[in-house]
Image (tube, grey):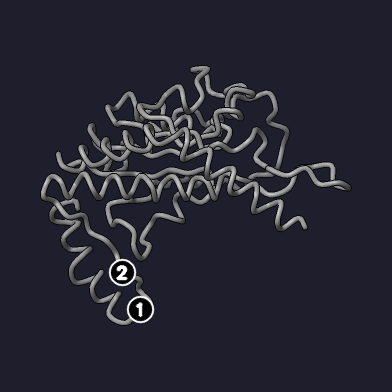
Amino acid sequence: MLLDRYWEHLDELYGRIRATQRDAIERAGRLIAGAVDKGGCVHIRDSGHIIDSELIYRGGGLILYKAFRYSLVVEDAVRKRDRGGLDTSMEGLARYALKSSGAMPGDVLICGSVSGRTFDVVDLAYEAGKMGIKIIAITSMSYAKSVESPHSSGKKLYELADVVIDNCAPAAEAMMEVEGLEPRLCAASGLSAAMIMWSVTTVVTEELLKLGKAPGVLKSANFPGGNDYNKSYVEPRYEREGL
């Protein structure tokens, strides 16, 4: 059955991560814990493959993970015309987003882009690095090495990062060849990224506990007492101490 084949692929994917990415996962965890110990904050920017939705405000997760999101709203109701001859690049917008944010030098930015060429993620990592923010990249190295960067720097995400964690997804994402289908089936990156970041979380937690600083761990808001605990203890403590 396809189901059995899929589970085999999952076992292979997780096994590959365990065999090849432990060192990078541990370095990422230590980097985050060290930054938080010094008063730094942790920002997450993802291209839409689970990292930000999986980690942010989850029962059993750390309050210190915060999503970094921005948008540009333009109101201009003129008629539509061909603007193909104009430079419409949004490169550099991330610089202004960072200026408007709470980000500071010494913080950590976790960036997720499977291909490593997602424009807004690369632009943000590029500008954040110049600001003195440490970058952790979650990417597929097999994918990233097969594509070109659209950024004027010529850099892809992994080339801008202090720590690179390979999500071990194949180029173009999907894992399974299926007879009768032209595209491959079942993307790998979301599942692997979730495994990786929860693994990083265990390292962050252990390192902070070694420093005598217990990180704020959220309870499920839908479990009895969970929401009260989060609102009365975890959130206020994070605002005071960054933990």
Q: How many marks?
A: 2
Tell me, for residue 219, which label it has, or none.
2
Q: Position of residue 205 (x, y in %)?
A: 25, 50
Q: Which residue is mark 1?
A: 223
5 vs 92: above or below: below
Q: Do residues under tags 1 and 2 come within 8 Å of each other at their CB atoms?
A: yes
Q: Amino acid at mark 1?
A: Phe
Q: Amino acid at mark 2?
A: Lys
Q: Which image quadrant is residue 217 in?
A: bottom left
Looking at the picture, tell me which residue is in the foreground, 50 or 142: 142
Q: Work out which residue is located at the far right of the displayed protein and give it.
A: 180
Tell me, for residue 14, which label it has, or none.
none
Looking at the picture, tell me which residue is in the foreground, 173 or 93: 173
Q: Residues within 10 Å of mark 2 (few under 14, many from 20)?
A: many
Element marked by disc 1: loop
Element marked by disc 2: loop
Q: Position of residue 9 (x, y in %)?
A: 64, 46
43 vs 149: above or below: below
Q: Position of residue 172 (x, y in %)?
A: 67, 36
